[in-house]
Image: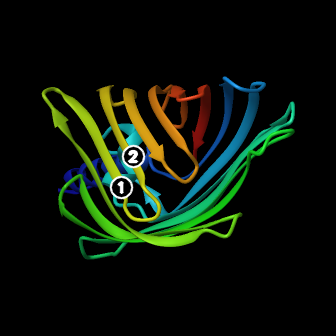
Amino acid sequence: MKKLAIASAIALSAIAVSGTANAYQAEVGGSYTYTDWDDFDATHQFGVDGTYYFNPVQTRNAPLNEAAFLDRASNVKAHVNYADNDGVKDSQYGAGVEYFVPGSDFYLSGNVGRDELEVDNTNIDSKITTYGAEVGYLPAPGLLLAVGLTGYDAKDGDDGVDPTVRAKYVTQVGQYDANFEAYGAFGDLDEYKVRGDLYLDKTLSVGADYYNNDLTERDEFGISAKKFLNQNVSVEGRVGFGDDYNTYGVRAGYRF
């Protein structure tokens, strides 16, 4: 009986260790984007981003890129993307919070951001502050439905607040995992986002996305890929095609 008790204790310890071995509580990343403009010189934009989770995220048997969402991991995040070269300034700043209400299927989120684009010797001088909040519900595993409000305040004095809807669904398509996302804002600010990712395995995904914003006059289609080299390190790339520009971006991330 004593040997059985010792063996059971060792087995339980091994299970506990294996269950937390791949946990992480923060992620930091660095990015570079080259934008080839039709009407003026190209820009080189550099970015940093970070996310902190209130509790360790368990990766389990999920696509590594979706582990935090599937684990319902509440978090705070921030990012800065900055470009200032050849008379073109193209920068974005933002911060946000996601909160999965413990013991329920409810979700809350909030965000604030700033988008700036200035081009010397032109009339292009756009500075827009945005903010938003959402209330969501998870009716099934991997499915989030949310409604909210988004507001903006542009440099020329225009401002407004509009309703939003959003959905995210991580599921299986045949033998593969997949992610589908859609977002819309309707009113004075018309903004739309759709995205799909196919996970060829738990570490590798390919995706496509589309984004349109009538306030910043951005209309862009993109294709992307992301690979986790191990449980902690990831690399990704994206090519975007806009009306008067193309973008080429890379990012590396580290979880710990």
* Snapshot quadrant of residue 140: bottom left
- Which residue is located at x 24 percent, y 70 percent? 105
Q: What whole-number distance in Å separates the C-alpha atoms at marks 2 and 1?
A: 6 Å
- Which residue is located at x 73 percent, y 35 percent? 45
Q: Position of residue 151 (x, y in %)?
A: 52, 70
Residue 17: tell me if it is visible. Answer: no
The kind of residue on which mark 2 rests is: Lys
Q: Are marks 2 and 1 in contact (CB under 8 Å)?
A: yes
Query: How far from the left and from the top, in percent, is residue 104?
Result: 24, 75
Nearer-the-camera pick, 22 or 179: 179
User: Dot 2, how many residues are within 10 Å of its Cα: few (below 14), some (14-19), or many (20+)?
Assistant: some
Q: Residue at x 61, y 68 (%)?
A: 158
- Count neighbours of disc 1 (C-alpha within 10 A) and say few if under 14, some if 14 to 19, many if 20 or more: some
The x, y position of residue 25, in whole percent, is: 53, 55
Does 100 appear above or below 177?
below
Residue position marked by numbered label 1 in the rendering: 184
Question: Looking at the image, which residue sits at the far front?
Answer: 123
The residue closer to the viewer here, 39 or 73, is 39
Q: Residue at x 19, y 55 (%)?
A: 141
Up the image or down, 115 lies above or below 236; here it is: below
Name the N-terminal-most of marks 2 and 1.
Answer: 1
Residue holding disc 2? 193
Q: Name the amino acid type tagged 1.
A: Gly
Residue 87, compared with residue 103, is above or below; it is above
Left or right: 77 in relation to 185: right
Left or right: 86 in relation to 62: right
Where residue 19 appears, x then y in whole percent? Answer: 35, 49
